[in-house]
Image: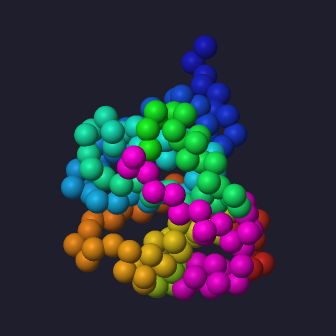
Amino acid sequence: KNVLFVDEGGAGTEALKGCAEIIAELPADTDHIFCAAGTGTTAAGLLNGIYRAGLKTRLHVVPVLKGGDFIADEIARYTGRTDQLVLHSAYHFGGYAKTRPELIDFIKNFTRSEGMLIDPVYTGKMFYAINDLLKNNYFDPSDKIIALHTGGLLGLLGMKEKF
């Protein structure tokens, strides 16, 4: 009776509640929060937290699936609105757990320069997107940006020959 089953991908109401609570731990003056998405549950929880806190923060979601635009509909199902959601669906590199040489090179360089591990399934794609948007002057220089590293490091083990 004291066990909580978490569905594959983390989808579920408990996950939504937990992810919404993350927002209270972040600076309220954050302009942009980024997260990678598979099912969209983390993003939906974060967006709920943003709305509940009355923040103006924009949530940027990087779907890791090819054709990941459906995630906006999934998020809307959980949140009821998506006016502060920005979807960056062009950074999937071929789909879930798919890579391309430029992503692998980016991950190697990022890890070397920042000293932080990122994976090719989720967080590598998110950080690649942020880097690309920064290079293309997407943000104001004064914008405060948070990249939410959600883990996913086990994705490295399945692709260790690429590193």
* Residues rendered magenta in the picture: 83-109
Note whether residue 20 is visible: no
Residue under the point 58% across and 42% down: 73
Q: Quadrant of residue 4?
A: top right
142 vs 92, left or right, is left
Residue under the point 66% across and 80% down: 104
| 90 drawn magenta | yes
| 130 drawn magenta | no
The colour scheme is: rainbow
Return the x and y of residue 26 as percentages of the image width and height. 29, 51
Q: Could you tell me which quadrant the N terminus lies in?
A: top right
Residue under the point 65% across and 28% down: 5
Residue under the point 64% across and 79% down: 103
> Is residue 77 positioned above or below 121 on the image?
above
Return the x and y of residue 30 as percentages of the image width and height. 27, 57
Return the x and y of residue 53 as percentages of the image width and height. 27, 38
